Amino acid sequence: MIITLILDGYNVIHAVPELARHLDRSLQSAREALVRLCQAYRARRGDIERLYVVFDGRDAEAFGSSAQQQGSVTVLFTERPEEADARILRVIEAERGRRCVVVSNDNEVANNARAFGARILSVQAFYQQVHPVKTSHLQSPASAGKAILSTRDAQQITEEYRQHLEKGGSK
């Protein structure tokens, strides 16, 4: 199913340590890191039709525009006195008829977005999708070089174990 993904920009930056570290350099560095992360994520997925990152507009003057296309990501800055929360809802309204997913840990954003019909994804769940946990240490028996039992062998072992337990219970 094709979706529109909407990120609560500063909420995501502050919740993801990898992005928050960029704040030591500058807010601009953190925003750019988030946009790069989103571009790479969208490139891997085939189901994201539109991807928006919404920021409060306090710094929009530095960008010269309240909306910019940065590759495959649309970056939106609110205009005073609007806050990112309200802008996210306006995006959901504009995307009516499409499945919207909002990424935020902010309860107010989540509740309001849900009321507008959007699905909510926590920042942690989003980040886990962006950077799945490497499971190379969780190998299947075949890939670890261990023998895989046939169904017949497994049944025989189970039957022998059942008989063993029955003998132990008759003492």
Image: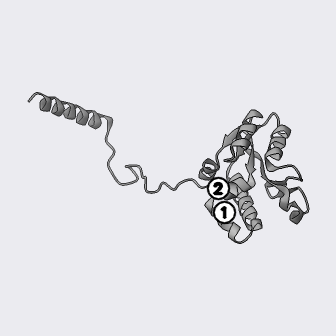
Quadrant, the N terminus: top right
Comparing 90 with 109, the one in front is: 109
Looking at the picture, how far across and down is residue 41, in whole percent?
A: 68, 54
Q: Badge 1: how crowded within 10 Å, few (<14), some, or many (20+)?
A: many
Comparing 98 with 44, the one in front is: 98
- The total number of labels drawn is 2
Comparing 149 with 7, the one in front is: 7
Amino acid found under the numbered disc labelled 1: Ala
Q: Residue at x 75, y 33 (%)?
A: 115
Q: Which element is circle 1 on? A: helix
* Labels 2 and 1 touching (C-beta < 8 A): yes
Amino acid found under the numbered disc labelled 2: Ala
Q: Badge 2: how crowded within 10 Å, few (<14), some, or many (20+)?
A: some
Residue 96 lies in quadrant: top right
Q: Residue at x 24, y 36 (%)?
A: 157
Q: Is residue 99 visible?
A: yes
Q: Which mark is residue 108?
A: none
Q: Is residue 17 left or right of residue 63?
A: left
Q: Which residue is label 2 attached to?
A: 15
Residue 70 lies in quadrant: bottom right
Q: CA distance from mark 2 to mark 1?
A: 7 Å
Location of residue 143 with respect to 152 vertically, above or below: below
Q: Which mark is residue 20?
A: 1
Q: Earlier in the sequence, mark 2 or mark 1?
A: 2
